[in-house]
Image (cartoon, rainbow, N blue to C red):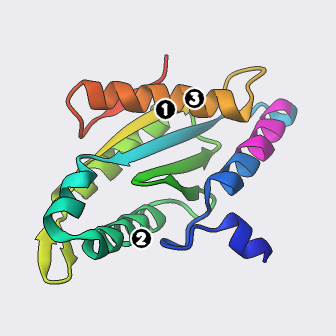
Amino acid sequence: LERQAITDSLTGLFNRRRIFQVIQQEISRYERHHRPFCLLLLDIDHFKKVNDTFGHSVGDEALRSFADILKNMGRQQDVVARTGGEEFCILLPEVNCEEAGQAAERLRQIIARAPLDLAGYSVSITASIGIAEVEANERADSIYQRADMALYKAKANGRNRVELAV
């Protein structure tokens, strides 16, 4: 029951509830040891078009494939979650904003270059990514909100890009 409470049933990733618990744990670690961490929010660009063109079953398969890419691209200590719809989150422990930006850009390029093979369809997707680095006296909801603002900046600036929170 505990696993079900913290896991997204479609992708097998952690869910929004669990990622907020992990963010709070990392904030506590940051307050004790002053080691940075970053939060990445990712959103699949124009995902509604995938569902509308190929159907929801192919859309679900796209979400599972996207989740697999995120899991396989990260380090063992990184925490990946699906926070809702086509939005995902990656927590990068002991990484500063510059390192997170480099990792996010590599991930963005991999996603954009590799079409997904879904139910016999070759589906190309891109992702917009927002990044926030933990700050002093931060709360889980505030770092998430800053990463979300950076994500929406990436979408507003043309999508398929990485933006850092200011």
Among all residues in the image, which is located at the extreme top? 166
Q: For numbered disc 1, what is the local secondary structure?
A: helix
Do residues under tags 1 and 3 come within 8 Å of each other at their CB atoms? yes
Residue 156 picture location, percent across and down:
27, 25
Residue 148 tag number: 1
Magenta stretch: residue 75 in it?
A: no
Q: Tell me the distance, in whole angstroms, between the alpha carbons under discs 1 and 3.
A: 5 Å
Which one is earlier in the sequence, the residue at label 2 or at label 1?
2
Regarding residue 26, the answer to whether it shows in the image is: yes
Q: Amino acid at mark 2?
A: Asp
Q: Give the residue at x 65% y 42%.
A: 94
Relative side of 46 to 25, left or right: left
The residue indicated by pointer 2 is: 68
The residue indicated by pointer 3 is: 145
Residue bounds of the magenta highlight: 23-31
Q: Give the residue at x 70% y 65%.
A: 6
